[in-house]
């Protein structure tokens, strides 16, 4: 499990990184990284089998605390999990795009 900064995540995101937003649904709807899949932290165990094991999975939350816990959980499950330091709040503050509403592709 690694923690990555926003610059590293932005580069991975531009290359199509698998991104999972572990915030609550109301937070996700208020604004999320484009393409991020919404899976609240408490529901993460139910989707472990759907996540890729051949490429990194980036976990993001509001600031980086929940995503760190999620990345640790997924790493124990054998997934190359990476927590995004600064979270969606940092992403938005850095001027990067945020999408509102529901949706998001399957990982």
Image: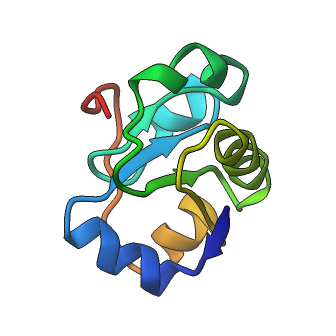
Q: Outermost residue, top direction? A: 46
Residue situated furthest left in the rendering: 15
Q: Relative to 15, say whether 30 is above or below.
A: above
Name the side, left or right, on which 26 lies relative to 1.
left
Determine whether, in the image, residue 64 is placed left or right of residue 100. Answer: right
Residue 102 position, x and y percent, is 34, 25
Quadrant location, the N terminus = bottom right
Query: In the image, is residue 72 above or below residue 46?
Result: below
Nearer to us in this view, 47 or 24: 47
Residue in view at x 51 percent, y 79 percent: 6
Look at 32% across and 72% down and name the residue there. 12
Q: Is residue 68 left or right of residue 59?
A: right
Q: Nearer the viewer, residue 54 or 2?
A: 54
Residue 94 in view: no
Front position in the image: 95 or 12: 12
> Whole-percent x and y of residue 29?
45, 32
């Amino acid at each position: 499990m690694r923690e990555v900064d926003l610059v590293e995540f932005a580069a991975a995101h531009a290359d199509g990184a698998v991104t999972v937003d572990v915030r609550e649904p109301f937070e996700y709807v208020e604004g999320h990284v484009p393409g991020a899949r919404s899976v609240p932290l408490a529901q993460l165990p139910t989707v472990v089998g759907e996540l890729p094991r051949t490429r990194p999975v980036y976990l993001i939350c509001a600031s980086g605390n929940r995503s760190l816990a999620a990345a640790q959980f997924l790493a124990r499950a054998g997934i190359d999990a990476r927590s995004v330091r600064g979270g969606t709040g940092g992403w938005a503050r850095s001027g990067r795009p945020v999408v509102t509403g529901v949706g998001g592709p399957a990982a």
